[in-house]
Image (cartoon, grey):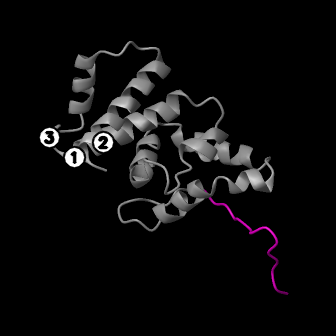
Amino acid sequence: MKLLELKKRVWNAWTRFNEASGVVTQSKNYVQDVKQFGDRRYKVTWIKALAHFSAQVSYESCLDAYMLVLNSFNFTPDRWDYESRADILDAFLMYPDGLELIKTGLEQLLGFTPQEQNKAHGFFELVEERGTQPGRDRLPIRFERKLTGAYSAA
């Protein structure tokens, strides 16, 4: 993602977070909020800000935990935030109850139909690849997915 587009995405995430929190947005607060992630001349600063604000939006607007699995963190290659998915999840896990919310969402998802569960494919891929990335711990979540129509050989 180009820096100009990244800055627009950060602004959108920041305003969505403030709206979800009931805060009136002011541009001077935006500048200060982004500065906490580093020098605004560098792309890495904007990537950190995007991850943080996106995670805040997911946390503040979470009404049902299963929506984290089916929507917020269900990253697919056609989503604009796909390349930032690991950073967004990391930022969300910084919340003290972030992991518990994800676990609750997975538990709720167990009550859904197999077709609905399969819609969370992007989330399951993210969890699987997270354990193989250097510097990132595997999530303490264990799940077994069986393909529809598959059977084990006896």
Asked if residue 48 can be seen in this view, the reply is: yes
Residue 52 belongs to magenta span: no
Residue found at x 56% / y 50%: 74
Q: Is disc 3 in contact with disc 2, using a CB cutoff of under 8 Å?
A: no
What is the magenta range?
Answer: 141-154
Secondary structure category for the residue under label 1: helix
Q: Give the quarter of the image for residue 11.
A: top left
Q: CA distance from mark 1 to mark 3?
A: 7 Å
Q: Give neighbour class at mark 1: few <14, some 14-19, many 20+ (Cα, 10 Å).
A: some
Q: Is disc 2 in contact with disc 1, using a CB cutoff of under 8 Å?
A: yes
Task: Determine whether 133 is above or below 19 in the image.
Answer: below
Q: Which of the labelled discs sits on residue 6, or is there none?
A: 2
Q: Give neighbour class at mark 3: few <14, some 14-19, many 20+ (Cα, 10 Å).
A: few
Read off the residue under disc 3.
41
Q: Residue furthest bottom?
A: 154
Q: Give the quarter of the image for residue 122.
A: bottom right
